[in-house]
Amino acid sequence: MRLLACLLFLLYPVLGGRHSGSLDLPAAMLLGIDISHHQQRIDWQQLVQNCELHFVFVKATEGGDFLDSLFAENWAWLREMGIRRGAYHYFRPKRDGALQADHYLRTVELQAGDLVPVLDIETTDGRHSEIVRREALEWLQKIEKALCVRPIIYTNQHFYERHLAGYFDDYPLWIARYSDEHPRLSTRSWQFWQFSEKGQLPGILRPVDLNVFRGTPSMLDRLCWYPQEGLPISSSSLDALP
């Protein structure tokens, strides 16, 4: 019942805004949200009592020195509540990619079962696409070398098609497209879809981003960090639904 209630909370703002009656969702899906200080302090106990979320991504860092003011609090609460958690870095192409990776690694302490790191890349900062991709690759490679796991890339569909299509295809992809229909990309498939930025959930005062994972719990587990395994995750290993 809690999962059904959560599903209604998640889909109501989307369905109510478009009057379509349904979302074009994959057959197998898991529900989740992503948060930052913009959602202010969250009443995690109220949220967990009313919703069964499969995962939550939390903003941790941005650029070379910015730390989200509520990251540590949200990160600890997610561990306490037993919700699968992941931490993302908002990428600034005007800053050195390797230095940004260092900032993330100093800030985020992963524990076994946490989702792998996420690179949120949605602005060029006025840089050419080649520079954006070069610095992003520096971040990705430094994280992969340090943690022996391949990070997830987050972006929106427009940015992906303009700057990233045909690159980084071995990295799991989280794509933003606010629509009834799921993203259809020119060169590859996706693993996560952010389908709305207007979710309304008990315990969260402000609108929150809503997401689905295209797969099963066991497939989501393959996108988590386990320090003793040290095997990179490729997007191709997640494409086939059972």
Image (cartoon, helix red, strand yellow):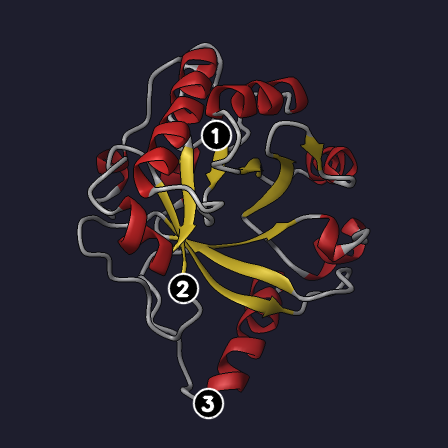
Q: Residue furthest top?
A: 228
In front: 175, or 24? 175
Q: Which amino acid does label 1 sit on?
A: Val
**Which residue does the numbered mark 2 point to in the structure image?**
177
Quadrant in the rendering for residue 221: top left
In front: 45, or 133? 133
| Residue located 30% across and 48% down the image | 163
Q: What residue type is labelled 3?
A: His
| Residue 5 x, y percent position in the rendering | 61, 69
Q: What label sits on residue 116 in the rendered view?
A: 1
Q: Which residue lies furthest to the bottom in this view?
A: 19
| Residue located 61% across and 55% down the image | 52
Residue 183 seen anywhere in this rendered image of the structure: yes
In front: 49, or 178? 178
If you read the primary sequence from the N terminus, does the residue marked by circle 2 or circle 1 appear first? 1
Quadrant the N terminus occupies: bottom right
Q: What label sits on residue 86 in the rendered view?
A: none
If you read the primary sequence from the N terminus, does the residue marked by circle 3 or circle 2 appear first? 3
